[in-house]
Image: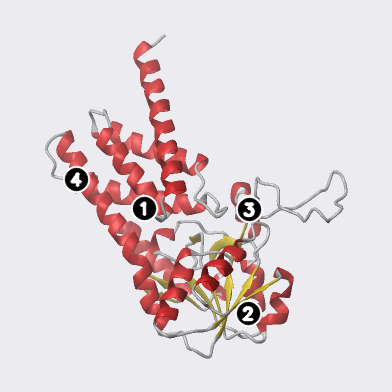
């Protein structure tokens, strides 16, 4: 038996548990963005790492990132994609930093990686304001807006618009199966925003009165489409038929190198929820209910009007070029 290998394996298991516990605690006790929390956890990992080689440290960062993707919960019932896209961008920044590093020794190398990590946190924190600035140019007091699901950046942009005196009528589908729309409704009405909560099945009926649709995204894929909460695709189809603009608000760290062409191209861990949906106790459900319980769907680029990001406003066709620039620089 290789005693050294066994001890290293046990040490990694302890490290991974600490990483997951720290992420969970910060996610439950702070209001920080899950992407910021992920990188802060990685900062602590780098700071406390006992690895003596660059290869060992990069392996530890990558392994911890994959472990978080597969085991952590980002909140509001989001899929693993929101963490995977952030970790992919983070890993790219780390790899790029290592390639150009002039550090002499492990401590200097760790300091360089910590600096890169903090720079990325600063970018993430500024991203909401950059997106909000772009959105305000498209908002108008007279508008009626349909908001899909729960999105930090969408809610933030609407609240900032409200503070600036731009008050729109907001329509919010309940967003089953997790009903995130109710949380969106709660946060907007708390500051006095005029909102109406609607059933998901009423989206088509309401759409003809809407001036624009706003949604966030769990991931922006290579062809300019998005993966988001189930129902986004249906809403986009209704908007397209009614000739209503469909706007996506998404931070650049959600750009990911996936290229789905249909709903079947999404992995089962993304497509389906592992949790049982909530039904009213008044419903008498049949035993052995055979239920399809989707979590996310894919909205193709031809249904999207514009994407508002911290890097600028893009048509879907421009996203691929932007992804190339991100990952090739």
Residue 209 shows in the view: yes
Q: Residue 60 at x, y = what percent? A: 34, 34
Relative side of 306 to 297, left or right: left
Among numbered discs 2 and 1, the one appearing first in the sequence: 1
Q: Nearer the viewer, mark 1 or mark 4?
A: 1
- The residue beneath circle 2 is 239
- Alpha carbon separation for disc pair 2 and 1: 33 Å
Which quadrant holds residue 173? bottom right
Label at residue 112: 4
Q: Which residue is mark 1?
A: 36
Image coordinates of residue 240 in percent, x first then y, are 63, 80
Residue at 70% of width from left, 69% of height from top?
200
Q: Give residue 170's position: percent from left, percent from top.
A: 57, 79
Question: Counting other residues with Cα less than 10 Å from the Cα at mark 2, is it few (<14), some (14-19), or many (20 or more)?
Answer: many
Instruction: Report crowding for label 4: few under 14, some 14 to 19, many 20 or more residues within 10 A (C-alpha).
Output: some
Q: How is the image coloured?
A: secondary structure
> Seen from this angle, which residue lies furthest top?
1
Kindly report the distance in space between the C-alpha atoms of the residues bearing marks 2 and 3. Answer: 22 Å
Helix, strand or loop for disc 1: helix
Q: Secondary structure at mark 3?
A: helix
For residue 313, which quarter of the picture? bottom left
At 30% across and 39% down in the image, what residue appears? 44
Q: Earlier in the sequence, mark 1 or mark 4?
A: 1
Q: What's the distance in space between the residues labelled 1 and 4, CA to CA? A: 18 Å
Callouts 1 and 4 close, C-beta under 8 Å: no
Q: Which mark is residue 271?
A: 3
* Residue 249 appearing in the image: no
Asked if residue 314 is positioned above or below residue 217 in the image, the reply reads below
């Amino acid at each position: 038996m290789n005693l050294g290998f066994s001890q290293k394996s046990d040490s990694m298991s302890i490290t991974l548990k600490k990483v997951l516990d720290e992420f969970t605690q910060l996610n439950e006790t702070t209001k920080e963005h899950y992407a910021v929390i992920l990188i802060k956890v990685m900062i602590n990992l780098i700071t406390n790492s006992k690895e003596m080689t660059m290869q060992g440290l990069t392996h530890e960062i990558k392994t911890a990132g994959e472990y978080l993707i597969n085991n952590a919960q980002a909140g509001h019932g989001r899929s693993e994609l929101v963490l995977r896209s952030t970790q992919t961008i983070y890993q790219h920044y780390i790899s790029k930093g290592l390639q150009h590093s002039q550090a002499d020794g492990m401590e200097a190398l760790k300091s360089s990686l910590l600096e890169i990590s903090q720079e990325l946190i600063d970018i993430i924190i500024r991203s909401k304001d950059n997106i909000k600035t772009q959105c305000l140019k498209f908002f108008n007091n007279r508008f009626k807006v349909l908001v899909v699901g729960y999105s930090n950046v969408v809610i933030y942009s609407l609240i900032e618009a409200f503070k600036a005196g731009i008050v729109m009528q907001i329509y919010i589908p309940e967003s089953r199966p997790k009903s995130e729309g109710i949380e969106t409704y709660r946060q907007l009405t708390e500051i006095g925003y005029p909102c109406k909560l609607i059933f998901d099945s009423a989206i088509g009926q309401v759409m003809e009165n809407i001036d624009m649709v706003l949604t966030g995204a769990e991931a922006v894929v290579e062809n300019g489409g998005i993966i988001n909460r189930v129902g986004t695709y249906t809403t986009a189809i209704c908007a397209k038929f009614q000739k209503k603009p469909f706007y996506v608000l998404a931070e650049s760290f959600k750009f990911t190198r996936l290229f789905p062409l249909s709903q079947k191209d999404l992995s089962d861990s993304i497509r389906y929820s592992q949790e049982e949906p909530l039904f009213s106790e008044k419903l008498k459900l049949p035993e052995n209910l055979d239920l399809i319980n989707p979590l996310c769907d894919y909205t193709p680029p031809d249904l999207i009007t514009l994407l508002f990001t911290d890097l600028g406003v893009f048509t879907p066709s421009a996203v691929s070029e932007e992804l190339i620039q991100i990952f090739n620089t």
